Amino acid sequence: MSHGHCGIVKAAPQALGAPKGTKKTMAISARGPAEKKKAIEEMAESIARAAIQPEYEIVNDASLELLARTSVSLARSGVDIIGASDMMDGRVGAIRAALDQVGFENTPILSYAAKFSSGFYGPFGRRQIPRPSSEIAVPTRWTRRTFARAMREIELDVEEGADMIMVKPGHALPGCDCRGRERFDLPLAAYQVSGEYAMIEAAGPQPVDRPGNA
């Protein structure tokens, strides 16, 4: 959507990702009482503006309804596979139920089961509306905790009816790809994002521009 989220958002007193009690320290530098007074006034005005700005959070259940309706529309249009990348909780189950209710039991769902924050999104991201980091499910720092969370995300989607699963970005975390394939008896895709694709292209054979080049 225009705001960068893959779901419906609403104004809320406290946005997700900004826990209550977060404190910020501000420092000012002034030469003399006049500059000090001016700096304090500017800082107070800045704090006041920030205080009245609405915070936003994703409305998960309303987003699921929209995803389900969109998936049915796509299936009726003739798509072969539904591949929702929104990362809403329960999206696979909602899409599966909606498809089954209107006779698309055989339309498979490709689940973007585990997304990882990564600098490899850079080339694509710079050409799009800036996206909030809350879209990404798991950080790329590879620890037992993040691996367990990734496996749990895949497991939940499989339980909800996913026919295929995907890890994104692809080559940066082969451990997740390999162990996911060992644990779940479903087709598994590794999504290579724009930065990965650019690396592969740059490392590939270069065109021969004159006789004698190898």
Image (cartoon, rainbow, N blue to C red):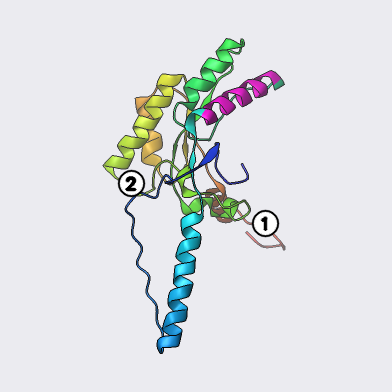
Q: In this view, does 168 lie above or below 71?
A: below
Residue 143 showing in the rendered view: yes
> Based on the displayed image, in which of its 4 quarters is residue 68 positioned?
top right
Q: Earlier in the sequence, mark 2 or mark 1?
A: 2
- 33 in the magenta segment: no
Residue 163 showing in the rendered view: no
Pick whichever, 27 or 181, lies toward us. Answer: 27
Q: Position of residue 193 (x, y in %)?
A: 54, 45
Mark nearest the camera among 2 and 1 is 2
Q: Residue under circle 1?
A: 207
Q: Is residue 74 above or below residue 168?
A: above
> What separation in Å lies between label 2 and label 1 (alpha carbons)?
37 Å
Q: Which residue is located at x 60 percent, y 13 percent? A: 104
Pick whichever, 73 or 153, lies toward us. Answer: 73
Q: Residue 61 carries which label?
A: none
User: Magenta stretch?
Assistant: 62-76
Q: Residue under circle 2?
A: 142
Which amino acid, by three-letter code, is at mark 1?
Answer: Pro
Q: Residues within 10 Å of mark 2 (few under 14, many from 20)?
A: few
> Based on the displayed image, in which of its 4 quarters is residue 137 positioned?
top left
Which residue in the rendered view is the most extreme toward the bottom?
32
Q: Which residue is located at x 45 percent, y 64 percent? A: 47
Q: Which residue is located at x 39 percent, y 50 percent? A: 18
